[in-house]
Image (spheres, grey):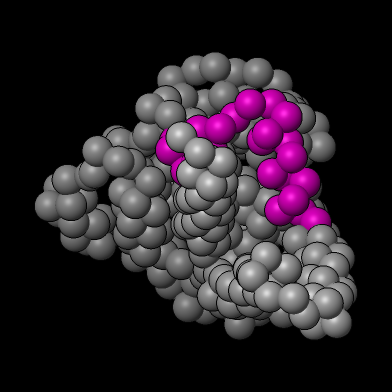
Amino acid sequence: MNFWGIINLKLLLDVLFAVGFGLLLFSRVKEQRTLWLLRGYLFLVSSAWFIQRYAYLPLTSKLIDAVVLACSLSLAILWQGELRRLMELLGTGRLAVLLGNPPKEFRATSTTITQLVDTAGKLSQNRKGALIVVDLGSDLRPEDFLYSGTNIEAQLSTDLLINLFATDTPLHDGAVLVKGNKIISAGVILPLSRQGISRYGTRHLAALGITERFDRCICIVVSEETGTLSLANQGKLERPITSSRLQELLAKLIGNQNSMGTNKGSLSKNVLSQKKDSGDNIISDINKKESEKSEIFINKKD
């Protein structure tokens, strides 16, 4: 093989690796505006490489290099949280999370959904505050929280969750971390979000904060003041919702994360049966009467 053959092979490998890396980035980006920014940045980088390699345009090359540098600094500031998370994953060797392949222990079942909905509904009726983080493949670890809480490592059950959020227990103010069908820890202190500080209480800000940093985890919130149910996902909060709506959202989100898929027929039957439940009707009435008040009320504890 001659010298030019080696050069062409290196060029081919270079292009293939660059395309593969670009496809990986595009597959991990969910928000449309972020996707547009990434496309524009990669277009500038590709243009700079093409001009430097195939065209002798020194002035144009310098200008594009300056624009790429400015954009790199801007994106580093704009995406500092995402870049920090990327370095954490690379440093800890959690490549399965980076590649979007959740391990089997994170795969929840329809039983998990039923228990979570049942727990949230009972806590809402009794107006007991709760914060439940469900790991769907982000591989959350103690260093990802402000305080990792108390290790539980117990089978998920409605009774245990309700007891953990009882007001006379030392763990009720923190969050509970759930992975698959297990309760991992309780009393977890989550990082707070900076959005909606004047609108939401501490629990809702914590739910937004953890889902902003990790895109494959969701957080169920029960308001202590109003009993309102909420669900945080990817830095967005849907509230107020009924227990039937919560079950629909959980079935959709968990079903999307499980590569094996979920039996949608059985889940839809559970949703229809839950709509007739008397407890769900009570929650719906509470949400209708107090939804306007809960949107403007600031509860520093909640």
Q: Position of residue 118 (x, y in %)?
A: 38, 44
Q: Nearer the viewer, residue 226 or 176?
A: 176
Q: Nearer the viewer, residue 48 or 97?
A: 48
Chief secondary structure of the magenta portion: helix
Q: Residue furthest front?
A: 2
Q: Nearer the viewer, residue 249 or 13?
A: 13
Residue 223 included in the magenta stretch of the image: no
Q: Position of residue 95 (x, y in %)?
A: 56, 32
Q: Quadrant of residue 273?
A: bottom left
- On the question of residue 105 being in view, the answer is yes
Residue 89 included in the magenta stretch of the image: yes
Question: Is 189 rendered above or below residue 282?
Answer: above
Q: Which residues are magenta?
A: 80-102
Q: Nearer the viewer, residue 221 or 279?
A: 221
Question: Is 66 rendered above or below residue 160?
Answer: below
Question: Is 272 rendered above or below residue 41?
Answer: above
Tell me which residue sits at (34%, 51%) in the image.
Answer: 256
Tell me which residue sits at (62%, 34%) in the image.
Answer: 140
